[in-house]
Amino acid sequence: MKLIESVKEFGGYLNRYTHYSVACQSEMTFSMYLPPQAAHSNVPALYWLSGLTCTDDNFRVKAGAQRYAAEHGIALIIPDTSPRGDSVPDAPEHYDLGQGAGFYVNAVQPPWDKHFRMYDYVVEELPHLVEMHLPLIPGVKSISGHSMGGHGALIAALKNPGAYRSVSAFAPICHPLNAAWGKGCFTAYLGENAALWQAYDATCLVQAGAHLPEILIDQGTADEFLVDGQLQPEAFQAACLQAEQPLSLRMQDGYDHSYHFIATFIGEHIAWHAKALR
Amino acid sequence: MKLIESVKEFGGYLNRYTHYSVACQSEMTFSMYLPPQAAHSNVPALYWLSGLTCTDDNFRVKAGAQRYAAEHGIALIIPDTSPRGDSVPDAPEHYDLGQGAGFYVNAVQPPWDKHFRMYDYVVEELPHLVEMHLPLIPGVKSISGHSMGGHGALIAALKNPGAYRSVSAFAPICHPLNAAWGKGCFTAYLGENAALWQAYDATCLVQAGAHLPEILIDQGTADEFLVDGQLQPEAFQAACLQAEQPLSLRMQDGYDHSYHFIATFIGEHIAWHAKALR
Protein backbone atom coordinates (compact mmCIF):
# COMPACT_ATOMS: atom_id res chain seq x y z
CA MET A 1 0.00 0.00 0.00
CA LYS A 2 1.56 3.25 -1.14
CA LEU A 3 0.55 6.76 -0.02
CA ILE A 4 0.55 8.92 -3.17
CA GLU A 5 -1.11 12.11 -1.89
CA SER A 6 -1.87 13.72 1.47
CA VAL A 7 -3.70 17.00 2.00
CA LYS A 8 -4.63 18.54 5.32
CA GLU A 9 -8.36 19.23 5.71
CA PHE A 10 -10.45 20.00 8.80
CA GLY A 11 -7.48 19.16 11.01
CA GLY A 12 -7.14 15.65 9.56
CA TYR A 13 -5.64 14.26 6.38
CA LEU A 14 -7.21 13.40 3.06
CA ASN A 15 -4.94 10.69 1.70
CA ARG A 16 -4.81 8.72 -1.52
CA TYR A 17 -3.30 5.26 -1.77
CA THR A 18 -2.53 2.72 -4.44
CA HIS A 19 -2.07 -0.98 -3.87
CA TYR A 20 -2.21 -4.25 -5.74
CA SER A 21 -5.60 -5.88 -5.34
CA VAL A 22 -5.72 -9.65 -5.24
CA ALA A 23 -9.49 -9.60 -5.79
CA CYS A 24 -9.25 -7.40 -8.89
CA GLN A 25 -5.84 -8.61 -10.08
CA SER A 26 -4.71 -5.04 -10.72
CA GLU A 27 -3.48 -1.86 -9.10
CA MET A 28 -6.31 -0.04 -7.32
CA THR A 29 -6.55 3.51 -6.03
CA PHE A 30 -8.60 4.64 -3.06
CA SER A 31 -8.95 7.76 -0.97
CA MET A 32 -9.28 7.98 2.76
CA TYR A 33 -10.01 10.82 5.12
CA LEU A 34 -8.40 10.37 8.51
CA PRO A 35 -10.05 12.72 11.02
CA PRO A 36 -7.94 14.60 13.59
CA GLN A 37 -8.93 12.05 16.26
CA ALA A 38 -6.95 9.39 14.36
CA ALA A 39 -3.72 11.11 15.39
CA HIS A 40 -4.10 9.74 18.93
CA SER A 41 -6.54 6.82 18.76
CA ASN A 42 -8.14 4.31 16.43
CA VAL A 43 -11.37 5.48 14.81
CA PRO A 44 -14.40 3.80 13.20
CA ALA A 45 -14.83 3.88 9.42
CA LEU A 46 -17.55 4.82 6.97
CA TYR A 47 -17.13 3.28 3.52
CA TRP A 48 -18.48 5.34 0.63
CA LEU A 49 -19.30 3.69 -2.69
CA SER A 50 -19.57 6.05 -5.65
CA GLY A 51 -21.78 5.95 -8.72
CA LEU A 52 -21.28 5.29 -12.43
CA THR A 53 -18.33 7.12 -14.08
CA CYS A 54 -16.89 8.19 -10.70
CA THR A 55 -13.41 7.54 -9.37
CA ASP A 56 -12.32 7.96 -5.76
CA ASP A 57 -12.07 11.68 -6.50
CA ASN A 58 -15.70 12.77 -6.85
CA PHE A 59 -16.88 12.24 -3.29
CA ARG A 60 -13.75 13.65 -1.65
CA VAL A 61 -14.03 16.86 -3.67
CA LYS A 62 -17.77 17.44 -4.02
CA ALA A 63 -19.69 16.04 -1.06
CA GLY A 64 -18.39 18.20 1.79
CA ALA A 65 -18.29 15.09 3.98
CA GLN A 66 -14.88 15.63 5.58
CA ARG A 67 -16.25 18.39 7.77
CA TYR A 68 -18.71 15.99 9.40
CA ALA A 69 -16.23 13.13 9.53
CA ALA A 70 -13.86 15.40 11.47
CA GLU A 71 -16.68 16.47 13.79
CA HIS A 72 -17.65 12.88 14.61
CA GLY A 73 -14.18 11.33 14.49
CA ILE A 74 -14.95 8.91 11.68
CA ALA A 75 -12.61 7.85 8.85
CA LEU A 76 -14.02 7.95 5.32
CA ILE A 77 -12.85 5.20 2.97
CA ILE A 78 -13.57 5.89 -0.68
CA PRO A 79 -12.75 3.13 -3.19
CA ASP A 80 -12.72 3.52 -6.94
CA THR A 81 -15.76 2.17 -8.86
CA SER A 82 -13.83 -0.48 -10.80
CA PRO A 83 -10.34 -1.70 -11.60
CA ARG A 84 -8.66 0.43 -14.28
CA GLY A 85 -5.79 0.44 -16.73
CA ASP A 86 -4.75 -0.80 -20.13
CA SER A 87 -4.75 -4.43 -19.07
CA VAL A 88 -8.32 -4.22 -17.68
CA PRO A 89 -11.25 -4.79 -20.08
CA ASP A 90 -13.42 -1.80 -20.89
CA ALA A 91 -16.35 -0.73 -23.05
CA PRO A 92 -15.23 2.82 -23.86
CA GLU A 93 -18.34 3.53 -25.91
CA HIS A 94 -20.52 2.88 -22.83
CA TYR A 95 -20.28 5.05 -19.70
CA ASP A 96 -22.34 2.43 -17.86
CA LEU A 97 -20.22 -0.69 -18.46
CA GLY A 98 -16.63 -1.65 -17.77
CA GLN A 99 -14.17 0.79 -16.17
CA GLY A 100 -16.05 3.18 -13.88
CA ALA A 101 -19.03 0.82 -13.73
CA GLY A 102 -18.01 -2.19 -11.64
CA PHE A 103 -21.48 -2.43 -10.07
CA TYR A 104 -20.00 -3.96 -6.89
CA VAL A 105 -20.46 -7.54 -8.09
CA ASN A 106 -18.06 -10.42 -8.74
CA ALA A 107 -18.19 -10.93 -12.50
CA VAL A 108 -18.32 -14.52 -13.75
CA GLN A 109 -18.48 -13.84 -17.50
CA PRO A 110 -15.44 -13.24 -19.72
CA PRO A 111 -13.79 -10.85 -20.40
CA TRP A 112 -14.85 -9.29 -17.07
CA ASP A 113 -14.37 -12.22 -14.68
CA LYS A 114 -10.64 -11.82 -14.10
CA HIS A 115 -10.66 -8.21 -12.83
CA PHE A 116 -14.22 -7.11 -12.09
CA ARG A 117 -14.56 -8.50 -8.58
CA MET A 118 -15.57 -5.29 -6.82
CA TYR A 119 -17.84 -7.07 -4.35
CA ASP A 120 -14.96 -9.05 -2.86
CA TYR A 121 -12.73 -6.00 -3.07
CA VAL A 122 -15.06 -3.70 -1.16
CA VAL A 123 -16.48 -6.18 1.34
CA GLU A 124 -13.36 -8.23 2.12
CA GLU A 125 -10.04 -7.10 0.75
CA LEU A 126 -10.14 -3.35 1.30
CA PRO A 127 -11.37 -3.45 4.93
CA HIS A 128 -8.74 -6.08 5.72
CA LEU A 129 -6.03 -3.94 4.14
CA VAL A 130 -6.93 -0.61 5.77
CA GLU A 131 -7.60 -2.13 9.19
CA MET A 132 -4.16 -3.69 9.09
CA HIS A 133 -2.26 -0.54 8.09
CA LEU A 134 -4.24 2.45 9.37
CA PRO A 135 -5.54 3.69 12.75
CA LEU A 136 -8.99 2.07 12.51
CA ILE A 137 -10.98 0.12 15.08
CA PRO A 138 -11.07 -3.36 13.53
CA GLY A 139 -14.55 -4.39 12.41
CA VAL A 140 -16.26 -1.14 13.43
CA LYS A 141 -17.55 0.09 10.11
CA SER A 142 -20.62 1.41 8.29
CA ILE A 143 -21.36 1.88 4.61
CA SER A 144 -23.10 4.35 2.33
CA GLY A 145 -23.10 5.28 -1.33
CA HIS A 146 -24.76 7.01 -4.25
CA SER A 147 -26.72 5.57 -7.17
CA MET A 148 -24.74 2.49 -8.32
CA GLY A 149 -22.82 2.94 -5.06
CA GLY A 150 -26.08 3.09 -3.11
CA HIS A 151 -26.90 -0.28 -4.60
CA GLY A 152 -23.42 -1.45 -3.59
CA ALA A 153 -23.90 -0.25 -0.01
CA LEU A 154 -27.30 -1.91 0.32
CA ILE A 155 -26.16 -5.30 -0.99
CA ALA A 156 -22.91 -5.23 1.01
CA ALA A 157 -24.92 -4.74 4.20
CA LEU A 158 -27.83 -7.04 3.33
CA LYS A 159 -25.54 -9.90 2.33
CA ASN A 160 -23.41 -9.56 5.48
CA PRO A 161 -25.65 -8.98 8.51
CA GLY A 162 -23.54 -7.80 11.43
CA ALA A 163 -20.59 -6.74 9.26
CA TYR A 164 -21.72 -3.12 9.11
CA ARG A 165 -23.06 -1.17 12.06
CA SER A 166 -25.35 0.82 9.74
CA VAL A 167 -26.14 1.37 6.06
CA SER A 168 -27.53 4.35 4.19
CA ALA A 169 -27.82 5.35 0.56
CA PHE A 170 -28.44 8.35 -1.69
CA ALA A 171 -30.66 7.69 -4.72
CA PRO A 172 -29.65 4.01 -4.83
CA ILE A 173 -30.36 1.62 -7.69
CA CYS A 174 -32.74 -0.43 -5.57
CA HIS A 175 -33.84 -3.10 -8.02
CA PRO A 176 -31.14 -3.39 -10.69
CA LEU A 177 -32.39 -6.60 -12.28
CA ASN A 178 -35.47 -4.67 -13.34
CA ALA A 179 -33.77 -1.45 -14.59
CA ALA A 180 -31.71 -0.58 -17.68
CA TRP A 181 -28.34 0.11 -15.99
CA GLY A 182 -28.63 -3.03 -13.87
CA LYS A 183 -29.75 -5.26 -16.72
CA GLY A 184 -26.87 -4.08 -18.90
CA CYS A 185 -24.18 -4.69 -16.28
CA PHE A 186 -25.70 -7.88 -14.86
CA THR A 187 -25.97 -9.40 -18.35
CA ALA A 188 -22.35 -8.54 -19.11
CA TYR A 189 -20.85 -9.46 -15.74
CA LEU A 190 -23.14 -12.29 -14.55
CA GLY A 191 -24.57 -13.81 -17.71
CA GLU A 192 -28.07 -15.27 -17.70
CA ASN A 193 -27.95 -16.78 -14.20
CA ALA A 194 -31.14 -15.52 -12.50
CA ALA A 195 -30.02 -16.66 -9.05
CA LEU A 196 -26.86 -14.57 -9.34
CA TRP A 197 -28.86 -11.52 -10.44
CA GLN A 198 -31.09 -11.87 -7.39
CA ALA A 199 -28.08 -12.28 -5.12
CA TYR A 200 -26.91 -8.78 -6.11
CA ASP A 201 -30.30 -7.04 -6.01
CA ALA A 202 -31.29 -5.25 -2.80
CA THR A 203 -35.01 -5.69 -3.36
CA CYS A 204 -34.64 -9.43 -4.04
CA LEU A 205 -32.35 -9.82 -1.01
CA VAL A 206 -34.99 -8.35 1.30
CA GLN A 207 -37.65 -10.53 -0.35
CA ALA A 208 -35.41 -13.55 0.26
CA GLY A 209 -35.17 -12.82 3.98
CA ALA A 210 -32.10 -10.60 4.46
CA HIS A 211 -32.71 -8.37 7.46
CA LEU A 212 -30.97 -5.36 9.05
CA PRO A 213 -31.79 -3.19 12.07
CA GLU A 214 -32.56 -0.11 9.94
CA ILE A 215 -31.88 1.35 6.52
CA LEU A 216 -31.77 5.07 5.68
CA ILE A 217 -32.33 6.23 2.09
CA ASP A 218 -32.59 9.77 0.73
CA GLN A 219 -34.08 10.19 -2.72
CA GLY A 220 -34.63 13.47 -4.57
CA THR A 221 -38.01 13.88 -6.21
CA ALA A 222 -36.52 15.83 -9.14
CA ASP A 223 -34.01 13.07 -9.90
CA GLU A 224 -34.11 12.34 -13.63
CA PHE A 225 -33.11 8.72 -13.02
CA LEU A 226 -35.97 8.23 -10.58
CA VAL A 227 -38.38 9.39 -13.25
CA ASP A 228 -36.98 7.02 -15.88
CA GLY A 229 -37.12 3.96 -13.62
CA GLN A 230 -33.42 3.30 -12.96
CA LEU A 231 -33.72 3.58 -9.18
CA GLN A 232 -37.10 2.11 -8.10
CA PRO A 233 -37.12 2.96 -4.39
CA GLU A 234 -40.84 2.12 -4.42
CA ALA A 235 -40.04 -1.54 -5.21
CA PHE A 236 -37.53 -1.64 -2.35
CA GLN A 237 -40.00 0.06 -0.02
CA ALA A 238 -42.71 -2.46 -0.89
CA ALA A 239 -40.32 -5.37 -0.25
CA CYS A 240 -39.27 -3.85 3.11
CA LEU A 241 -42.89 -3.34 4.13
CA GLN A 242 -43.72 -6.93 3.22
CA ALA A 243 -40.70 -8.28 5.11
CA GLU A 244 -41.02 -5.90 8.09
CA GLN A 245 -37.57 -4.54 7.29
CA PRO A 246 -37.27 -1.10 8.97
CA LEU A 247 -36.66 1.51 6.27
CA SER A 248 -36.52 5.27 6.45
CA LEU A 249 -37.06 6.35 2.84
CA ARG A 250 -37.05 10.15 2.71
CA MET A 251 -38.33 11.65 -0.53
CA GLN A 252 -36.54 15.01 -0.68
CA ASP A 253 -38.63 17.54 -2.54
CA GLY A 254 -37.02 19.13 -5.57
CA TYR A 255 -33.56 17.56 -5.27
CA ASP A 256 -31.85 15.98 -8.27
CA HIS A 257 -29.25 13.20 -8.67
CA SER A 258 -26.16 15.41 -8.29
CA TYR A 259 -23.54 15.87 -5.61
CA HIS A 260 -25.39 19.04 -4.56
CA PHE A 261 -28.13 16.70 -3.32
CA ILE A 262 -25.55 14.54 -1.53
CA ALA A 263 -23.86 17.60 0.00
CA THR A 264 -27.20 18.75 1.40
CA PHE A 265 -27.87 15.57 3.37
CA ILE A 266 -24.46 13.95 3.94
CA GLY A 267 -24.20 15.65 7.32
CA GLU A 268 -27.38 13.95 8.53
CA HIS A 269 -26.19 10.61 7.19
CA ILE A 270 -22.82 10.86 8.91
CA ALA A 271 -24.46 11.87 12.18
CA TRP A 272 -26.78 8.87 11.84
CA HIS A 273 -23.88 6.49 11.16
CA ALA A 274 -21.90 8.05 14.01
CA LYS A 275 -24.56 6.95 16.51
CA ALA A 276 -24.31 3.36 15.28
CA LEU A 277 -20.50 3.47 15.26
CA ARG A 278 -20.17 4.69 18.85
CA MET B 1 -29.60 37.73 -18.08
CA LYS B 2 -30.43 34.11 -18.78
CA LEU B 3 -30.79 31.33 -16.21
CA ILE B 4 -29.09 28.28 -17.74
CA GLU B 5 -28.98 25.91 -14.75
CA SER B 6 -30.69 25.59 -11.36
CA VAL B 7 -30.02 22.89 -8.78
CA LYS B 8 -31.56 22.67 -5.33
CA GLU B 9 -29.02 22.59 -2.49
CA PHE B 10 -29.44 23.11 1.26
CA GLY B 11 -33.00 24.27 0.68
CA GLY B 12 -31.94 27.05 -1.71
CA TYR B 13 -30.93 27.12 -5.34
CA LEU B 14 -27.54 27.03 -6.99
CA ASN B 15 -28.10 28.85 -10.27
CA ARG B 16 -25.95 29.63 -13.27
CA TYR B 17 -26.54 32.62 -15.53
CA THR B 18 -25.16 34.02 -18.75
CA HIS B 19 -25.43 37.64 -19.84
CA TYR B 20 -23.77 40.12 -22.15
CA SER B 21 -21.20 42.17 -20.27
CA VAL B 22 -20.74 45.76 -21.37
CA ALA B 23 -17.50 46.00 -19.38
CA CYS B 24 -15.98 42.90 -21.00
CA GLN B 25 -17.72 43.22 -24.37
CA SER B 26 -18.62 39.53 -24.36
CA GLU B 27 -20.97 36.93 -22.95
CA MET B 28 -20.13 36.13 -19.34
CA THR B 29 -21.16 33.25 -17.10
CA PHE B 30 -21.58 33.41 -13.35
CA SER B 31 -23.01 31.21 -10.61
CA MET B 32 -25.10 32.28 -7.69
CA TYR B 33 -26.36 30.47 -4.64
CA LEU B 34 -29.67 31.80 -3.39
CA PRO B 35 -30.26 30.61 0.18
CA PRO B 36 -33.72 29.44 1.31
CA GLN B 37 -34.32 32.83 2.97
CA ALA B 38 -34.33 34.47 -0.50
CA ALA B 39 -37.67 32.80 -1.23
CA HIS B 40 -39.42 35.29 1.06
CA SER B 41 -37.09 38.28 1.52
CA ASN B 42 -34.09 40.04 0.05
CA VAL B 43 -30.74 38.81 1.31
CA PRO B 44 -27.19 40.22 1.53
CA ALA B 45 -24.50 38.96 -0.85
CA LEU B 46 -20.99 37.60 -0.57
CA TYR B 47 -18.96 37.86 -3.78
CA TRP B 48 -16.38 35.15 -4.30
CA LEU B 49 -13.47 35.70 -6.69
CA SER B 50 -11.68 32.57 -7.83
CA GLY B 51 -8.04 31.93 -8.67
CA LEU B 52 -6.04 31.28 -11.82
CA THR B 53 -7.50 28.66 -14.22
CA CYS B 54 -10.86 28.58 -12.39
CA THR B 55 -14.29 29.21 -13.84
CA ASP B 56 -17.45 29.88 -11.82
CA ASP B 57 -17.61 26.10 -11.29
CA ASN B 58 -14.72 25.39 -8.90
CA PHE B 59 -15.97 27.22 -5.83
CA ARG B 60 -19.58 26.05 -6.16
CA VAL B 61 -18.48 22.41 -6.37
CA LYS B 62 -15.45 22.21 -4.09
CA ALA B 63 -15.67 24.71 -1.23
CA GLY B 64 -18.70 23.46 0.67
CA ALA B 65 -19.79 27.09 1.13
CA GLN B 66 -23.47 26.69 0.31
CA ARG B 67 -24.13 25.00 3.63
CA TYR B 68 -22.96 28.07 5.54
CA ALA B 69 -24.61 30.50 3.13
CA ALA B 70 -27.92 28.72 3.77
CA GLU B 71 -27.32 28.81 7.52
CA HIS B 72 -26.66 32.56 7.53
CA GLY B 73 -29.09 33.57 4.77
CA ILE B 74 -26.42 34.99 2.47
CA ALA B 75 -26.34 34.79 -1.33
CA LEU B 76 -23.05 33.70 -2.94
CA ILE B 77 -22.15 35.36 -6.22
CA ILE B 78 -19.39 33.62 -8.12
CA PRO B 79 -18.13 35.28 -11.32
CA ASP B 80 -15.85 33.69 -13.87
CA THR B 81 -12.17 34.69 -13.76
CA SER B 82 -12.12 36.32 -17.22
CA PRO B 83 -14.14 36.78 -20.37
CA ARG B 84 -14.01 33.71 -22.61
CA GLY B 85 -14.69 32.55 -26.13
CA ASP B 86 -13.18 32.46 -29.60
CA SER B 87 -13.43 36.23 -30.04
CA VAL B 88 -11.60 36.91 -26.76
CA PRO B 89 -7.77 37.01 -26.81
CA ASP B 90 -5.95 34.22 -25.04
CA ALA B 91 -2.47 32.85 -24.38
CA PRO B 92 -3.24 29.13 -24.49
CA GLU B 93 0.34 28.16 -23.77
CA HIS B 94 0.18 30.04 -20.43
CA TYR B 95 -2.22 29.01 -17.66
CA ASP B 96 -1.48 32.31 -15.95
CA LEU B 97 -2.35 34.78 -18.70
CA GLY B 98 -5.45 35.47 -20.77
CA GLN B 99 -8.62 33.42 -20.39
CA GLY B 100 -8.89 32.14 -16.81
CA ALA B 101 -6.40 34.77 -15.62
CA GLY B 102 -8.15 38.16 -15.76
CA PHE B 103 -6.43 39.29 -12.54
CA TYR B 104 -9.38 41.59 -11.73
CA VAL B 105 -7.85 44.62 -13.45
CA ASN B 106 -8.94 46.82 -16.36
CA ALA B 107 -6.43 46.09 -19.12
CA VAL B 108 -5.11 49.06 -21.09
CA GLN B 109 -2.73 47.22 -23.43
CA PRO B 110 -3.75 45.56 -26.70
CA PRO B 111 -4.87 42.91 -27.40
CA TRP B 112 -6.34 42.66 -23.90
CA ASP B 113 -7.85 46.12 -23.47
CA LYS B 114 -11.13 45.48 -25.26
CA HIS B 115 -12.34 42.52 -23.18
CA PHE B 116 -10.20 42.15 -20.05
CA ARG B 117 -11.95 44.65 -17.81
CA MET B 118 -12.67 42.35 -14.90
CA TYR B 119 -12.26 45.10 -12.31
CA ASP B 120 -15.17 47.08 -13.70
CA TYR B 121 -17.12 43.89 -14.25
CA VAL B 122 -16.79 42.64 -10.68
CA VAL B 123 -16.97 45.96 -8.85
CA GLU B 124 -19.63 47.75 -10.90
CA GLU B 125 -21.47 45.84 -13.59
CA LEU B 126 -22.17 42.52 -11.91
CA PRO B 127 -23.48 43.96 -8.60
CA HIS B 128 -25.70 46.35 -10.56
CA LEU B 129 -27.05 43.51 -12.66
CA VAL B 130 -27.78 41.04 -9.87
CA GLU B 131 -29.22 43.66 -7.52
CA MET B 132 -31.63 44.67 -10.28
CA HIS B 133 -32.83 41.17 -11.11
CA LEU B 134 -32.47 39.02 -8.00
CA PRO B 135 -33.71 39.12 -4.38
CA LEU B 136 -30.72 40.97 -2.93
CA ILE B 137 -30.56 43.87 -0.50
CA PRO B 138 -29.09 46.63 -2.68
CA GLY B 139 -25.60 47.62 -1.63
CA VAL B 140 -25.31 45.15 1.23
CA LYS B 141 -22.38 43.06 0.10
CA SER B 142 -19.05 41.61 1.16
CA ILE B 143 -16.24 40.05 -0.82
CA SER B 144 -13.76 37.20 -0.54
CA GLY B 145 -11.59 35.12 -2.82
CA HIS B 146 -8.69 32.76 -3.29
CA SER B 147 -5.16 33.38 -4.60
CA MET B 148 -5.61 35.65 -7.66
CA GLY B 149 -9.19 36.08 -6.42
CA GLY B 150 -7.93 36.95 -2.95
CA HIS B 151 -5.94 39.73 -4.60
CA GLY B 152 -9.13 40.74 -6.43
CA ALA B 153 -11.14 40.85 -3.22
CA LEU B 154 -8.51 42.92 -1.40
CA ILE B 155 -8.17 45.52 -4.15
CA ALA B 156 -11.94 45.73 -4.73
CA ALA B 157 -12.45 46.56 -1.07
CA LEU B 158 -9.37 48.76 -0.60
CA LYS B 159 -10.17 50.85 -3.69
CA ASN B 160 -13.83 51.31 -2.67
CA PRO B 161 -14.06 52.03 1.05
CA GLY B 162 -17.65 51.61 2.18
CA ALA B 163 -18.71 49.57 -0.84
CA TYR B 164 -18.18 46.24 0.96
CA ARG B 165 -19.22 45.54 4.52
CA SER B 166 -16.24 43.19 4.95
CA VAL B 167 -13.40 41.58 3.04
CA SER B 168 -11.50 38.34 3.54
CA ALA B 169 -9.14 36.24 1.49
CA PHE B 170 -7.60 32.78 1.27
CA ALA B 171 -3.92 32.68 0.29
CA PRO B 172 -4.19 35.96 -1.63
CA ILE B 173 -1.58 37.35 -3.98
CA CYS B 174 -0.82 40.27 -1.66
CA HIS B 175 1.88 42.10 -3.58
CA PRO B 176 1.49 41.18 -7.26
CA LEU B 177 3.84 43.82 -8.66
CA ASN B 178 6.64 42.02 -6.85
CA ALA B 179 5.72 38.40 -7.74
CA ALA B 180 5.99 36.31 -10.92
CA TRP B 181 2.25 35.82 -11.63
CA GLY B 182 1.50 39.46 -10.98
CA LYS B 183 4.42 40.78 -13.01
CA GLY B 184 3.43 38.62 -15.97
CA CYS B 185 -0.20 39.73 -16.00
CA PHE B 186 0.48 43.36 -15.09
CA THR B 187 3.04 43.67 -17.88
CA ALA B 188 0.62 42.19 -20.41
CA TYR B 189 -2.52 43.98 -19.25
CA LEU B 190 -1.17 47.28 -17.90
CA GLY B 191 2.10 47.86 -19.75
CA GLU B 192 4.96 49.65 -18.05
CA ASN B 193 2.87 52.20 -16.14
CA ALA B 194 4.10 51.93 -12.52
CA ALA B 195 1.21 54.00 -11.15
CA LEU B 196 -1.30 51.58 -12.65
CA TRP B 197 0.56 48.60 -11.19
CA GLN B 198 0.42 50.20 -7.74
CA ALA B 199 -3.27 50.95 -8.15
CA TYR B 200 -3.98 47.21 -8.41
CA ASP B 201 -1.63 46.02 -5.67
CA ALA B 202 -3.09 45.52 -2.20
CA THR B 203 0.18 46.18 -0.41
CA CYS B 204 0.77 49.42 -2.35
CA LEU B 205 -2.84 50.52 -1.76
CA VAL B 206 -2.42 50.21 2.00
CA GLN B 207 0.92 52.02 1.79
CA ALA B 208 -0.84 54.78 -0.16
CA GLY B 209 -3.44 55.29 2.54
CA ALA B 210 -6.37 53.01 1.69
CA HIS B 211 -8.04 51.96 4.93
CA LEU B 212 -10.74 49.46 5.95
CA PRO B 213 -12.24 48.52 9.33
CA GLU B 214 -10.70 45.03 9.30
CA ILE B 215 -9.26 42.44 6.92
CA LEU B 216 -9.27 38.67 7.49
CA ILE B 217 -6.72 36.47 5.69
CA ASP B 218 -6.11 32.73 6.05
CA GLN B 219 -2.85 31.39 4.68
CA GLY B 220 -1.67 27.77 4.78
CA THR B 221 1.93 27.27 5.89
CA ALA B 222 2.39 24.30 3.50
CA ASP B 223 1.25 26.33 0.48
CA GLU B 224 3.77 25.82 -2.33
CA PHE B 225 3.04 29.31 -3.70
CA LEU B 226 3.78 30.89 -0.34
CA VAL B 227 7.16 29.24 -0.36
CA ASP B 228 8.02 30.42 -3.87
CA GLY B 229 7.08 34.04 -3.18
CA GLN B 230 3.89 34.43 -5.25
CA LEU B 231 1.71 35.44 -2.29
CA GLN B 232 3.82 37.58 0.10
CA PRO B 233 1.41 38.00 3.01
CA GLU B 234 4.39 39.23 5.05
CA ALA B 235 4.71 42.29 2.78
CA PHE B 236 1.02 43.03 3.21
CA GLN B 237 1.25 42.50 6.96
CA ALA B 238 4.18 44.91 7.20
CA ALA B 239 2.27 47.53 5.22
CA CYS B 240 -0.80 47.10 7.44
CA LEU B 241 1.29 47.39 10.60
CA GLN B 242 2.92 50.55 9.31
CA ALA B 243 -0.43 52.07 8.29
CA GLU B 244 -2.33 50.87 11.38
CA GLN B 245 -4.64 48.91 9.10
CA PRO B 246 -6.34 46.19 11.22
CA LEU B 247 -5.44 42.79 9.78
CA SER B 248 -6.10 39.31 11.07
CA LEU B 249 -3.57 37.16 9.21
CA ARG B 250 -3.96 33.57 10.35
CA MET B 251 -1.11 31.25 9.35
CA GLN B 252 -2.80 27.83 9.25
CA ASP B 253 -0.32 25.12 10.07
CA GLY B 254 0.15 22.43 7.43
CA TYR B 255 -2.52 23.58 4.95
CA ASP B 256 -1.78 23.87 1.25
CA HIS B 257 -3.19 26.04 -1.58
CA SER B 258 -6.08 23.74 -2.51
CA TYR B 259 -9.84 23.86 -2.10
CA HIS B 260 -9.45 21.45 0.84
CA PHE B 261 -7.84 24.38 2.67
CA ILE B 262 -10.67 26.68 1.61
CA ALA B 263 -13.30 24.10 2.62
CA THR B 264 -11.74 23.87 6.09
CA PHE B 265 -12.08 27.59 6.85
CA ILE B 266 -14.87 28.88 4.59
CA GLY B 267 -17.40 28.37 7.38
CA GLU B 268 -15.49 30.73 9.66
CA HIS B 269 -15.17 33.30 6.88
CA ILE B 270 -18.87 33.21 6.07
CA ALA B 271 -19.78 33.53 9.75
CA TRP B 272 -17.42 36.52 9.97
CA HIS B 273 -18.94 38.17 6.89
CA ALA B 274 -22.45 37.40 8.19
CA LYS B 275 -21.81 39.58 11.25
CA ALA B 276 -20.82 42.52 9.04
CA LEU B 277 -23.76 41.94 6.70
CA ARG B 278 -26.38 41.93 9.45
Image: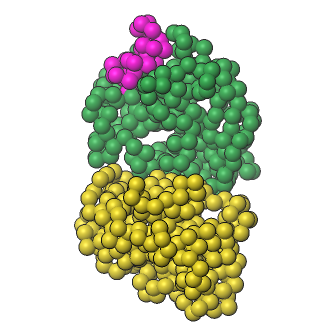
Chain colours: A yellow, B green
Q: Which quadrant, please, contains the N terminus of chain B?
A: top right
Residue B121 in magenta stretch: no
B159 lies above or below A167: above
B260 lies above or below A54: above
* Residue A1 visible to an observer of this rendering: yes
Q: Mainly helix, strand or loop, the magenta region?
A: helix
Residue most extreme to the front: A110
Residue B216 quadrant = top left
Residue A95 quadrant = bottom right
Residue B266 position, x and y percent, is: 46, 47
Residue B121 position, x and y percent, is: 61, 24
A188 lies above or below B15: below
Residue plotted at (62% across, 89% down): A207
Q: Which quadrant, please, contains the C terminus of chain B?
A: top right
Residue A277 position, x and y percent, is: 41, 78
| Highlighted magenta segment, given as a residue range | B174-200
